[in-house]
Amino acid sequence: MKLFKCQACDQLLYFENTKCERSQHRLGYLADAALLSALEEEQAGWHALGRPGRTFRFCANAAHDACNWLVPAGSAEAFCASCRHNRTIPDLTSAENLRRWRKLEIAKHRLFYTLLRLGLPLANRVDDPEHGLVFDFLADAPDPTGPKVLTGHDNGIITINVKEADDKEREAMRAQMREPYRTLLGHFRHEVGHYFWDVLVRDGGFLDAFRERFGDERQDYDAALQKNYREGPPADWQEHFVSTYASCHPWEDFAETWAHYLHIVDTLEMAASFGISVRPRITRDPDLATEIDFDPHQAKDVETLVEAWLPLTFAVNSLNRAMGQPDLYPFILSAEVIDKLGFIHRIVHASARPVP
């Protein structure tokens, strides 16, 4: 993620902004240009100051204050590049569902920002009726004894329980699962990792290389999960996995590592946008210093990302502790985990299409 500025007045803007408070221009996001643009209304639609000569309209979900992305005025699509992947949304006559869904869309749009910036293939169910990527945002039945909605992935269909949008519910689940970190955006990044395992690994010719690093995914998945819940992770899990859940099964290892790859790329871009550098005054150790002056989406190798990421996390974790907060990034990247991140980096860039 990066910072933006208003084309009318140079005011600093953030990704979710819908109005420039200085110039009073309405704002809309142009996904094909990775640009938040000030807008001026015309008879034919909205003129984007960031793309002169072109006219746009808002995604249909802007009517629910759930999206600020734009669609070309002449397009047959009602929805933007992110929202057209929605298959099911909750009942919006419920104010609670609407509030939760808006939070889900903030996280999902941040996910799609990165996926689009990486140039990853993003077919929906119109493009690929059998395997396209779609989201079902579902709520539990009103009857507390009824079936519960389980967040997960199945052949391109990602189901998210809308209660995950409630901080209290999510924190209770985080504590119950003994997780150091649980966010909406993390859910989206993890679950989409399962989808891209299908697309990039299974169907992309990387199965053998995957099995060399992550293990054989043909082992019984349900049995592996039950063993993990019963016995917990292996004692040396931090030497091999980015999280305890990653140790359950090769599929979960990949999805967890994929999520962390997206965490790293997105956060490094924001750090670069702020011009952040890290250079502790108490030591000259080069491993603790970094100048984040590159586009992480275009990094030549994973070492470039990790060499910037580690000093940044050492610094921000220390800042969080100074405020009495948990570490921003409470994970250890062992040599084996970095190798797995490198595998993901390679398959992402092997399949990426050109991006602006």
Image: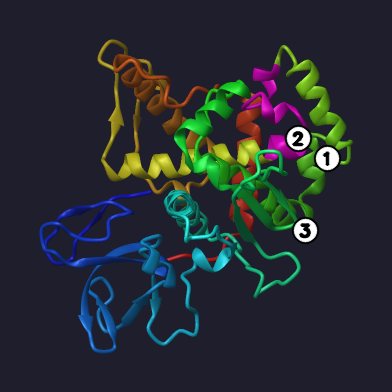
Q: Quadrant of the C terminus?
A: bottom left
Q: Indicate the position of residue 210 as horizontal and vertical percent values.
A: 76, 42
In reply to whether residue 268 is colored magenta, the answer given is no
- The boundaries of the magenta stretch are 237-254
Q: Which residue is mark 3?
A: 203
Number of the label disc, if any, that sits on residue 318: none
Please indicate, yes or no, whether residue 119 appears anywhere in the rendered image: yes
Which residue corresponds to the image point at 46% horizontal and 49% vertical from the top-left?
100
Which residue corresponds to the image point at 55% horizontal and 47% vertical from the top-left?
162
Looking at the picture, tell me which residue is in the foreground, 303 or 242.
242
Label 2–label 3 contact, CB within 8 A: no
Q: Indicate the position of residue 55 as horizontal and vertical percent values.
A: 31, 83
Q: Which residue is mark 1?
A: 217
Please indicate, yes or no, whether residue 293 appears anywhere in the rendered image: no
Report the mark closest to the observer, 3 or 1. 1
Q: Earlier in the sequence, mark 2 or mark 3?
A: 3
Q: Which residue is mark 2?
A: 214
Which residue corresponds to the image point at 41% horizontal and 71% vertical from the top-left?
59
Q: Is residue 282 above or below residue 293?
A: above
Left or right: residue 356 compared with residue 335: left
Label 2–label 1 contact, CB within 8 A: yes
* Figure quadrant of residue 84: bottom right
The amino acid at mark 3 is Asp
The amino acid at mark 2 is Phe
Q: Indicate the position of residue 63 as horizontal and vertical percent values.
A: 37, 69
The CA span between labels 3 and 1 is: 14 Å
Q: Is residue 49 above or below residue 66?
A: below
Left or right: residue 117 compared with residue 152: left
